């Protein structure tokens, strides 16, 4: 137990601590009521708990989560049908315990800063752009960041109206509030990436100072008991409850009088059903702007993620590298990522357009098909093939698997293009090209396409050769694009999922969407420097990353590296670096 002064209640009869065996039964209404009653009783104490005591709890969480890291990754590997011992199994370490441990470490550091300075320290610099918008560099923070992410940087752009002088007041707002009541938050867990639910609840608990009931997604309910073991301290303090069930349980909780606000990672259709109700009645309420539920809802709801390829003097090795870079953005997690590659945007007359596509085809053919574990994947895949019978499939898909699919040569002017308006959420990607007299004009037109034609505002990537940026016209167009793109995360030269994985960076859609046009959702998570007025974040990476990124399909030692950096994150030490470097270089 921590040294904190809160009393530690029991766990209301909900299965919290045993390993999942088969199907976990839905939580009953009596169990849900008891869980919410427990949380309501603790909300005030949690809101007033000192930062020192919170740090002690985080230390326990780091220790206990590191103990279950192996079970966590193995359970996900089995559920998703990844062969044991293969490099692809490293995904489950990275997207699960590694990111959660990183989140815990960053929160502990932020709370130590709040104790000393009143808010988390910004590594800086903090700048004011010519238009008055304030930006703050948030990454790298430590020497280890510079070692593991050489050449990477990230900055957060604040919403208009925030000044350099007022910026500190927009950090750690919950820790400066006079409201001592806190609140009870419902987190509806996601079924595709195992760190999502855990990191969402950490945001509610440690950034917003709310107590949390987490409903596990039925698809990964098996993680609930493992997560409970890792988050034992929060359960013991009565500020977290983990419950189980499908839509009926979700509906019961969203409408429960003891739930003050809701966070969901999932589908825009799910949010609409929660707010307006399902079916025709729900559609009528939305049209009449008469929501059935008016509780605050934050959400992250996916995206048609684009990669804008800025034409330039790419070499043959550049084309080969970025062909695999693009393929990695699709094949990771079998394509069941909200930031998976959905549209490649190229310059129509770039001499290397065909070569890059040929490289994408070649690398898709090298990646073994994966189990289509997420519900509805086959139907979505079929819908895209029906719209585009010319689509190319790669890989001999076995039972329960789907091939990788590329739909190239899309018309950028096509009305109701499924590839632009629907997130495939399976192994489908596409390519389109824009005519433009110059590279700079291409960038401008690509921004228009991304902002006006593609569904969602979560993330977008630009690939741009450093020699292209030596051209003032191209550099000006790229810098304007970063300012004008209406996306929560903009990545330069790397998969935008890095913005998810850094954790210090806010993760969520571009602000301004309401429930009548929710797009990629509202609000942010992660955001361990606790900014309250975020517009977007910008992640920059070298044009080519060396050693090879762990998420590239051809990385031979991804599993070994992922295990080592997970345990490094739990207990950083310079003595662990040689082993990590050795495995990384062997990849």
Image (cartoon, helix red, strand yellow):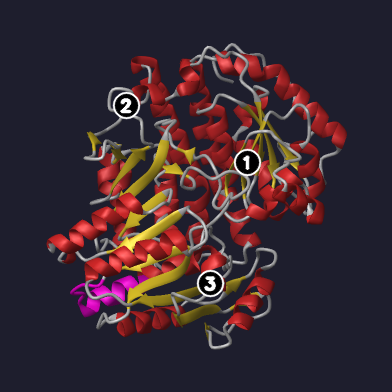
Name which of mark 3 and mark 1 comes first in the sequence.
1
Q: Residue at x 68, y 79 (%)?
A: 399
Q: Quadrant of the N terminus?
A: top right
Vertical order, 17 against 93 (above or below): above
Write down the residue under mark 2: 121
- In the image, is 235 to the left or to the right of 500? right
Q: Which residues are magenta?
A: 311-324
Residue hosting label 1: 227
Q: Quadrant of the C terminus?
A: bottom left
* Magenta stretch encompasses residue 452: no
Most foreground residue, 207 or 231: 207
**Residue occupied by mark 3:** 419
Q: Position of residue 278 (x, y in %)?
A: 78, 52
Q: Pointer 1 and pointer 2: residues touching (CB < 8 Å)? A: no
| Depicted 135 relative to depicted 49: above or below | below
Q: Nearer the viewer, residue 355 or 367?
A: 355
Asked if marks 3 and 2 touch (Cβ < 8 Å), the reply is no
């Amino acid at each position: 137990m921590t040294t904190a002064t809160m009393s530690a209640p029991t766990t209301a009869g909900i299965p919290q601590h045993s390993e999942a065996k088969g199907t976990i039964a839905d939580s009953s209404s009596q169990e849900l009521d008891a869980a919410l009653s427990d949380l309501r009783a603790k909300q005030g104490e949690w809101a007033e708990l000192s930062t020192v005591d919170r740090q002690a709890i985080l230390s326990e969480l780091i220790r206990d989560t590191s103990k279950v890291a192996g079970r966590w990754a193995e359970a996900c590997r089995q559920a998703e049908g990844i062969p044991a011992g293969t490099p692809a199994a490293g995904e489950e370490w990275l997207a699960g315990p590694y990111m959660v441990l990183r989140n815990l470490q960053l929160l502990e550091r932020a709370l130590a800063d709040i104790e000393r300075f009143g808010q988390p320290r910004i590594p800086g610099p903090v700048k004011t752009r010519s238009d008055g918008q304030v930006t703050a560099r948030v990454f790298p923070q430590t020497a280890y960041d510079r070692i593991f992410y050489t050449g990477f940087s990230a900055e957060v752009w604040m919403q208009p109206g925030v000044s350099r002088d007022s910026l500190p007041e927009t950090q750690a707002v919950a820790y400066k509030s006079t409201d001592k009541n806190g609140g009870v938050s419902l987190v509806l867990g996601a079924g595709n990436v195992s760190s999502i639910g855990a990191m969402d609840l950490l945001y509610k608990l440690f950034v917003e100072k709310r107590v949390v009931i987490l409903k596990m997604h039925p698809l990964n309910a098996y993680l609930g008991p493992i997560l409970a073991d890792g988050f034992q301290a929060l359960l013991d303090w009565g500020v977290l409850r983990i419950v189980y069930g499908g839509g009926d349980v979700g509906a019961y909780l969203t409408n429960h009088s003891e739930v003050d606000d809701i966070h969901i990672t999932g589908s825009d259709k799910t949010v609409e059903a929660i707010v307006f109700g399902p079916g025709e009645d729900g559609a009528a309420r939305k049209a009449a702007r008469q929501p059935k539920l008016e509780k605050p809802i934050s959400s992250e709801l996916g995206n048609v993620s684009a990669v804008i390829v800025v034409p330039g003097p790419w070499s043959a090795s550049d084309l080969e590298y970025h062909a695999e870079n693009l393929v990695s953005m699709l094949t990771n997690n079998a394509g069941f990522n909200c930031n998976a590659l959905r549209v490649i945007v190229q310059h129509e007359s770039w001499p290397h357009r065909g070569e890059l596509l040929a490289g994408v085809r070649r690398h898709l053919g090298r990646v073994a098909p994966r189990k289509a574990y997420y519900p509805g994947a086959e139907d979505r895949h079929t819908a895209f093939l029906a719209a585009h019978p010319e689509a190319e499939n790669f890989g001999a898909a076995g039972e329960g698997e789907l091939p990788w699919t590329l739909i190239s040569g899309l018309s950028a002017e096509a009305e109701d293009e499924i590839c632009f308006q629907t997130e495939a959420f399976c192994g489908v990607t596409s390519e389109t090209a824009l005519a433009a007299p110059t590279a700079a004009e291409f960038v401008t037109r690509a921004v228009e396409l991304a902002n006006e034609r593609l569904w969602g505002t979560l993330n977008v990537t630009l690939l741009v050769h450093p020699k292209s940026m030596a051209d003032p016209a191209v550099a000006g167009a790229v810098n304007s694009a970063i300012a004008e793109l209406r996306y929560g995360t903009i990545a330069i030269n790397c998969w935008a999922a890095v913005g998810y994985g850094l954790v210090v960076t806010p993760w969520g859609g571009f602000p301004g969407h309401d429930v009548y046009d929710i797009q990629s959702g509202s609000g942010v998570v992660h955001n361990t420097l606790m900014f309250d007025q975020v517009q977007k974040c910008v992640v920059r990476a070298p044009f080519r990353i060396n050693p090879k990124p762990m998420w590239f399909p051809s990385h031979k030692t991804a599993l070994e590296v992922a295990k080592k950096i997970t345990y490094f994150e739990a207990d950083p030490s310079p003595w662990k670096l040689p082993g990590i470097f050795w495995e990384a270089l062997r990849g």
